[in-house]
Each structure stands twice: as structure tokens, then as C-alpha cells.
Image (cartoon, grey):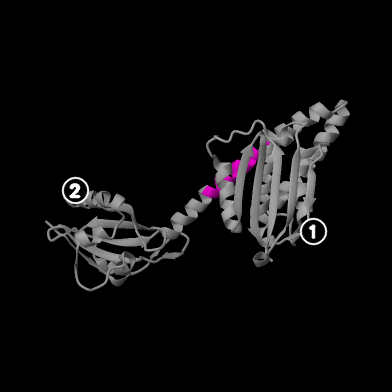
Amino acid sequence: MGTAILADDRQGKDGATTPLVGLWVYDSARRVLSVDERCRALFALDGAGDLPMDRILAAIHPDDREGVSTSLVEAIQNKGDLHGTFRIPRDGERDGWVQAIGWHDDAGGSTALSGVILDTTAERELEAQRRLHLAEMNHRIKNLFALVSAMIGSADREAQSREDLVENLRGRVAALDRAHSMISGGEALEPLPLDDLIERILAPALGPKTVTMNVEPVLIPISILTPLVLILHEWVTNSAKHGALAAPDRTLTIDARRDGDGLRILWREQAPDYDAKALPGFGSRLLQASVLQLGAEKTRNFEDGWLTIDLRLPLDDAE
């Protein structure tokens, strides 16, 4: 198959076209690669003319070079096609991902491969985001089950009758639904008062338990609502499992106030079951990602059965 045919875009089943990022021809006898300008740009290579294969391999991620070289050799020896995906390091950026497709020249005795290279970085990043979103969704579902379990246990201890139990659970499930709506972005359309935000997230796990709250009047902008809600929801879930919200005789105090140009939230609770040596799970990674998204600073301290979390985040830039 000649390379001239490859210069056109190919059309998919849905009628959309997929541009070929670069064209190349590999001569295994001379170990040189002829490439077009798009291929050179993809590998960040200057100059003109044929390129030694060693120079191409040097532009590929070190962990992928051997696999690319082996695939080329096998395609030449077997007179077969080449299909490979590899990374290209980029200064100051994430590695780029490239897919190489090649086929053996049909001419008798030829030692050449002709092919195309496509930049698949965007597709890889979308797939990574999809996996992250799925992991986040699974984690939220597990948190919901954990909260429901804590709600049932608490409601059972507090209920004086079957009717009390049903009414208690109905109210908490409704509160849980309201809190989850905020997390999923289905409710908040304008800035929310911080005290209202905290109360609504606490409500599903709270019941008749009293929490001491000292929260200054602060409006939370929509732009930072989701990561802040995720952080507070994670704290509430962990507290319902291991901390103050897991038992009626434990204390939880929440202080929040303006701190210069930002906001400071101090969460302090009795958490005798807290395991400071536990390995971080997805919840910890989600917390860290949310803190980074807010441009915030967070410290955690566990001493004498008390867990203290200090969160400081910029606020004025988000308003």
C-alpha cells in the first residue's frame, strides 16, 4: 500500500473524519525513518531528511523503547503489520501518548514498513478522567451505605417505638438526599451560607445529637462548592464510622471564620477508634485532590483520643 493514499483523512462509520497526525516509512536495512513534518513535530525533532532509528528511539519514553524496537523487528521479520502505543516525554508537561500503525511493503523482498502515527494523548486523558469519576462514584456510594448503616444504628438506639424509628429514618434519608444533591451539583445555583451548608451535610448522621458550631456568616461561592462539600461529607462519613457521630456520648465542635482573605474551618472531635496508622484509601486521595483543587492547606492531628483537622482555604479569589 503506497503512502500517497495515506495522506487523506479516513472516514469513520459515523461520517466523521480522523486526521492522520503523521506519516512515516521505516527502512530496516538502513535503520532510518523517513517522516513528514507532523511526525517531526510530534517527536519534537528538528532538521530535515531521513532520521536514524536510534534518534527516534531516544525521543520515546525509556520504559517503552525496547517494546517499540522489538515490535519493529518482529513486523519486518514476519512481514506483518505493526500496532503499538507508547509515550513521548514532554518538557514540563505530562507524557504524550502515541499510537503507531504500520504495514509491510508488498514489494518482493522489501525491508520497509509504511505507516501512520496518531496523537492519542487526549483520548488517554479522557479515559483517565472516566476511571477517576467511576472511582469517585463508587466511593460516594460506599459512603452513602456507611452513613445509612450509621443512621439505622443510631435511630434504633434512640427510637421509643416502631413509629419513632420509621419517622427518624425517613427524616434522615431525606436529609441525606438533600446533602447528596449538593454534592452532585443538582441543587445549588447561587452562593450558600456556610452554616447552612454544614448543617445540611451533618443532618443525615446527626439525629438528636448536639454538635457545637461556631460559624461566622460566610457565603460559599459556587466555584468552590463541590470540593468543599466533598471534604465536609468525607469528614462526616468518617465521624459516623469512627468518631464523635458514631456514639451519643462523644463531642464534636466545628469552628469556622474569616481568616484574612480566606476561610478557616477547625473540626475537633472525640474519636477513640481513629486509626492514625491506617493506610490511605480512595477517600484520603479524594480529600487530597479536593484540598488541592481549593488551593487550601490542611493539617490533621490526633492526640489523647481527640482528632483535630485544620483547613485553611482562599476565598476572595473564588467570589
Q: Is residue 146 above or below residue 66?
A: above
* Residue matched to label 1: 217
> In the image, what residue type sits under mark 1?
Pro
Q: Residue at x 73, y 53 (%)?
A: 256
Asked if marks 1 and 2 touch (Cβ < 8 Å), the reply is no
Instruction: Give the quarter of the image for residue 10.
Output: bottom left
**Image quadrant occupied by the C terminus:** bottom right
Question: Where does the image place residue 164, in percent across and percent down from the top left?
Answer: 87, 30
Q: CA distance from mark 1 to mark 2?
A: 73 Å
Determine the main secondary structure of the stretch shown in magenta: helix
Q: Which label was assigned to residue 78?
A: 2
10 Å crowding of disc 1: few (<14), some (14-19), many (20+):
few
Q: Which label was assigned to residue 154?
A: none
Instruction: Give the quarter of the image for residue 221.
Output: bottom right
Q: Residue at x 40, y 58 (%)?
A: 120
Instruction: Give the quarter of the image for residue 236.
Output: top right
Q: Give, as a single range, the part of the protein colored magenta.
A: 132-146
| Magenta stretch contains residue 316 | no
| Magenta stretch contains residue 138 | yes
Q: Is residue 171 above or below residue 159?
A: below
Question: Where does the image place residue 53, in percent across and percent down from the top left?
Answer: 20, 60
